Image (tube, coloured by chain):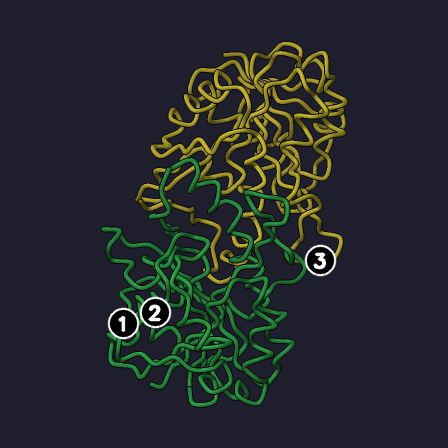
Chain colours: A green, B yellow
């Protein structure tokens, strides 16, 4: 499939590399490709600059957000949550219409320090905000409950764990579930409509505290039943 | 140990019966024992009246909240979340002082129907509200993330799953962890201070949606790592 991954951080890179490795035609979308490629310093999280990664992945192209989205069948929102709506606006509602829009972002608010709180929760969710803002996109919320490495290689944990999908479009969820299975996910739980993203986005607070208690981000939820 | 279980619903009954079965001296606390025993109809959840259950558990006594708490070393808050603070107030701060106070309640708000939202979340929690209201109690939040039957018999799931403890008092957490292990819990994760109850209370929204998606309440979270 032709897939656009919007976002050049660790989540975007992990998804783009994995999808490309599986044979998909992947373009990473960013606001200003020139600016993205011109950075030579590690980002705020200590990750190597994008151009280092891009050099290692010559098969993955970089394009402006709108161009990347326009050409894709599936668009992945791998931005940070606080910038998600603005990024998608820049990608263009007309380029998202009819597309499967995979939303991986979390509504984290770091303004009061760590751990972050959520800027939308409980009676609404970022997934729903995105679906409302882009009513012609077929939004599927998934993969926001585990770290980037495990998103694309859950088998590395050595035991089965679970991922969730939320969305109003059954065919879009089936497409996304197929991609998740191709990553190695063996327990994909369909929670229902996009409003169920309230549940998975509200997993972040315990996820963050588990990371602190366990001293690692290499863990995932398994729903034992 | 002498243990008071405050609450006569399914959670209170399950905890009281299991603790008694393990040899503890258990008293169930309720606002008005006479009124509790006089009910002959099933409760709003369709559970048999308390006196039916009490007849099957003659070794467990029933007492007013204050009397039950006063005599106990460990007090279990098994009320519903919306009534928790008022119930504990009636039990009496002086009867909770110095005690291990196990808080199992969830801040569920059913005023807008199902699924409920949370009346406190993210930047505060019911566990913290209880600790602030009763500063001399040694509050440990736990067991609020799974159903009553699994709380006291997790092995019935047939595979290991996880429970969490949150609290500011290390000795109180050790006492509670010992009780959890005696129930059969083999993966008790200490998340840290009582403020980490924000994380576990915010698991309820996904728990409720999982119950809908899976068609059962017989499931639990396992943290795979």
- Chain holding disc 1: A
Residue sitting at 46 percent across and 18 percent down? B175
Name the quadrant containing residue B197. top right
The residue pinned by badge 3 equals B113
Residue A196, compared with residue B192, is above or below; it is: below
Asked whether residue A225 is in view, the answer is no
Residue sitting at 41 percent across and 21 percent down? B178
- Is residue B133 left or right of A27 when viewed as pictured? right
Residue B22 screen position, x and y as percent: 42, 20
How would you rate the neighbour count of disc 2 (Cα within 10 Å): few for under 14, some for 14-19, many for 20 or more? some
- Chain holding disc 2: A
- Is residue B108 left or right of B12 when viewed as pictured? right
Pointer 3 and pointer 1 on the same chain: no
Residue sitting at 52 percent across and 30 percent down? B166
How would you rate the neighbour count of disc 3 (Cα within 10 Å): few for under 14, some for 14-19, many for 20 or more? few
Q: Secondary structure at mark 3?
A: loop
Q: Nearer the viewer, residue B39 or B65?
A: B65
How would you rate the neighbour count of disc 1 (Cα within 10 Å): few for under 14, some for 14-19, many for 20 or more? few
Q: Secondary structure at mark 2?
A: helix
The residue pinned by badge 2 equals A51
Would you say the residues marked 2 and 1 are in contact, meaning their CB atoms lie under 8 Å apart? yes
Residue A11 screen position, x and y as percent: 40, 63
């Amino acid at each position: 499939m032709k897939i656009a991954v919007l976002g050049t951080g660790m989540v975007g890179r992990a998804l783009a590399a994995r999808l490309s490795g599986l044979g998909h035609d992947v373009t990473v979308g960013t606001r200003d490709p020139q600016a993205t490629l011109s950075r030579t310093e590690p980002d705020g999280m200590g990750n190597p600059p994008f151009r280092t990664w891009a050099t290692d992945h010559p098969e993955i192209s970089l394009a402006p957000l709108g161009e990347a989205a326009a050409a894709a069948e599936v668009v992945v929102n791998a931005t940070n949550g606080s910038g998600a709506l603005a990024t998608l606006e820049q990608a263009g509602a007309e380029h998202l219409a009819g597309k499967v829009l995979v939303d991986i972002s979390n509504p984290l608010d770091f303004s009061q320090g760590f751990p972050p709180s959520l800027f939308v929760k409980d009676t609404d969710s970022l997934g729903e905000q995105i679906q409302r803002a882009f009513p012609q996109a077929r939004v599927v919320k998934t993969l926001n409950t585990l770290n980037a490495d495990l998103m694309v290689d859950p088998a590395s944990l050595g035991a089965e764990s679970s991922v969730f999908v939320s969305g109003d479009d059954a065919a879009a969820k089936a497409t996304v579930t197929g991609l998740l299975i191709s990553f190695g996910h063996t327990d994909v739980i369909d929670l229902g409509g996009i409003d169920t993203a309230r549940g998975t986005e509200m997993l972040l607070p315990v996820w963050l505290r588990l990371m602190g208690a366990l001293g690692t981000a290499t863990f995932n939820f398994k729903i034992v039943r």
